[in-house]
Image (cartoon, grey):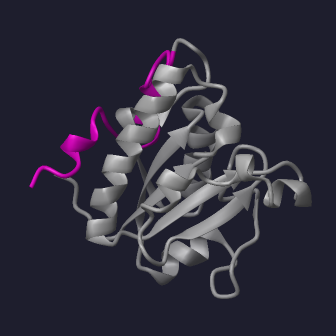
Amino acid sequence: MLDTNGLGIVIVDMQDLCLVRLVEGKRRRIIGTLEGFLERVKELDLPTIAFQLADNHCNEHLNNPAYQTVPSIKERLPVGASIFWKSLNDGFTYYYEGSEQDKTPSDYFYRRGVSKVLVIGLFAEMCVYETAKGAKANNFQVMFCDKLMEARNPGGLTTCEPFKRMGKYYQNYSELFND
């Protein structure tokens, strides 16, 4: 079982803009799995950040529903969760639109005593992986869960080895919360 003391959750690119690139079965699976997982995260009141991809601070993206975290995920975020816009792959480095109190994703987690993050979401081989590298560069331990992320390519992740080299790797989120 995962020790939730000092744990934060990072959700990457769970927005329609990205989901449309997945085949329908994968789309339904990742949304359904994340919905169930986030119910547990909400119960535990774990600090959570959702990163939303937008190109080059483009204002038209900020008001476009396709660029927003999908409603079924957003409504399951714990109270106090923060949403940051990001450009490029790494949300910890290429972010904007922080709050007055938490100007950076790291500020948000540091203020809440987070020392390790579980990084999940879409485009595992790019955005999830690069955001995890950014978290690690900001001195967070990183973890991954295979069933809580989805690759962009149709064949899925070709290997989990880069993730295992970077941090703890779980196959299924039931391994996280065996209580």
Residue 6 shows up from this direction: yes
Q: The C terminus lies in which quarter of the figure?
A: bottom left
Residue furthest left as drawn: 179
Q: Which one is nearer the viewer's eye here, 155 or 73?
A: 73
Q: Which one is nearer the viewer's eye here, 167 or 98?
A: 98
In the image, 40: left or right of 24?
left
In the image, 96: left or right of 99?
right
- Which residue does the image show at 26% across and 64% down from the upper left? 4
Residue 5 shows up from this direction: no
Q: Quadrant of residue 160?
A: top left
- Identify whether 120 is placed above or below 110: above
- Which residue does the image show at 59% across and 77% down from the upper left? 107
Residue 36: x and y in percent read 31, 48
In the image, 138: left or right of 64?
left
Q: Which one is nearer the viewer's eye here, 29 or 117?
A: 29
- Which residue does the image show at 69% across and 78% down from the upper left? 103
Q: Which residues are magenta?
A: 156-179
Q: Per the image, is 154 magenta?
A: no
Q: Quadrant of residue 153?
A: top right
